[in-house]
Amino acid sequence: MSPAASKLTPDRRRQARRDATYSALFGTIPTLLLDNSAVIITYIALLGGGNMFSMLSSSLISIASTLLLLPMVGFTEKLGLKASVRVAGYLGCATYMLMAAAPFFGSFASPLVIIAAFAFCLTNPLYVNAWYPLLDGFLLPQERSHFFGQMRFLYQLLSSALFLLLGLLMGKNPPLWFFQIIIVLVAISLLGRSHYIDRLPLTSDKPVKSRYNFRSAFKIAIRNGPLVGFSVYVCFVSLGYTSIIPLVYIYMKSHLELPPNMVVSISSLTMIGIMVGYLCASSLQRLLGTKWLQILCHLCFIAVSLACFCCGKESGNVILKFALLLMIQGFATACFGVCFSTETLALASPGNKTMASAFCNTYSSAGHSVGRLGTSLVLGSMLLAPSWQLGTRVVSSFQTLFLIYAVWLIFCLLLLVLLPAVVPVHEDYYQP
């Protein structure tokens, strides 16, 4: 149990949970815009970018997190948790404004969107490194699952409503200025995140005056067997499942040739699946336990990958099938995400919270980035045959990638023994 959280009154903890939720509502849309929606993908396409640029845009957050989460731990400790969030908010706002201005740069427009998006992603590790230690200041262990599920349900509800509205408003041929307005509004929302983070309770948020001992903190993390095992498992599974959603969007746009408004509207259904997953995750975790919920999410990722492989142009009602599969994938992703967050806090040993959370998130982001960046390079290099024959069916390169994901995720079933929830008896720190 966090000493800081245990000293707070129930009313103060309740208010802190509300403030943290409000900060997430303001700050989540910029991340989702890059990571799980079709808005930026469509924006890049309208600026003349190809499938490689579109897929690359969805991998930028994870690439930046992989590279910078651990190196920025010392900077977060020196700057202070709340100050880190403020700096990330101001810089992130500026990068989104630059992204909105991309059409004024002519032929350099689509690369500029990628550059600005990556610059935003470089600020994200500052926020992520501060987020989990901030939560530990007011969350009791028994409150974690409910908090993460409820908070993420609310921000997915907001995001789903916004993206569904965007799909309805933009029409079949949306103008560039429509996307520019969206991106500017998203930039401003980052400032609201900092406002509510400043209201969270802390026993101390003074910058560390002495030199932060990165090596010592890192040694504590890597000697924590459950933390390392969990991180490795999440890395390998993330490599397989995180590319499915953006690849489906690109598949629908470029292969099935759906109009932009339909792709964006379908992306809102994905968010509805995620939203329902967050709403149910806490109850499912209590009912099934973390162990079985993680295993079922893993099996669900395999099933969705195989089902996407089976959905080709010749399939009947292919759009409805993809919409249903995206909702299921979103549901499983949400439940898996809640398990990840609760286990991260449970595995972070006292006095080393920032390093431990950065360690877990780095491995998760590494899998995320390798999966999406690898997919991006495959699409851009035309490494796979555009199509091949399987009996009487013609299988596209997109379907081949879905099959590769499924095979990889089946292999990752061997790594379930690394999960602390599956093999809970350890001498190292683990407080579920």
Image (tube, rainbow, N blue to C red):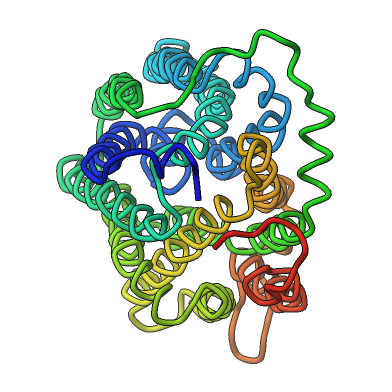
Please give left or right for residue 416 compared with residue 343 in the image.
right
Residue toward you, 341 or 263: 341
> Residue at coordinates 75% horizontally, 67% vertically from top-left?
426
> Residue at coordinates 51% horizontally, 80% vertically from top-left?
307
Residue 329, quarter of picture: bottom left
Please give left or right for residue 24 compared with residue 59 in the image.
left
Q: Height in image: 68 above or below 135?
A: above
Quarter of the picture containing the C terminus is: bottom right
Query: In x, y percent, where is residue 5?
Result: 41, 41
- The reply to whether residue 64 is in sight is yes
Query: In x, y percent, where is residue 326?
Result: 40, 67
Please identify the residue farthest to the bottom as the structure is shown: 391
> Residue at coordinates 60% horizontally, 90% vertically from top-left?
392
Q: How many marks?
A: 0
Please identify the residue farthest to the front as the structure is shown: 7
Residue toward you, 416 or 201: 201
Query: In x, y percent, where is residue 81?
Result: 50, 23
Query: In x, y percent, where is residue 158?
Result: 22, 46
Residue toward you, 390 or 268: 268
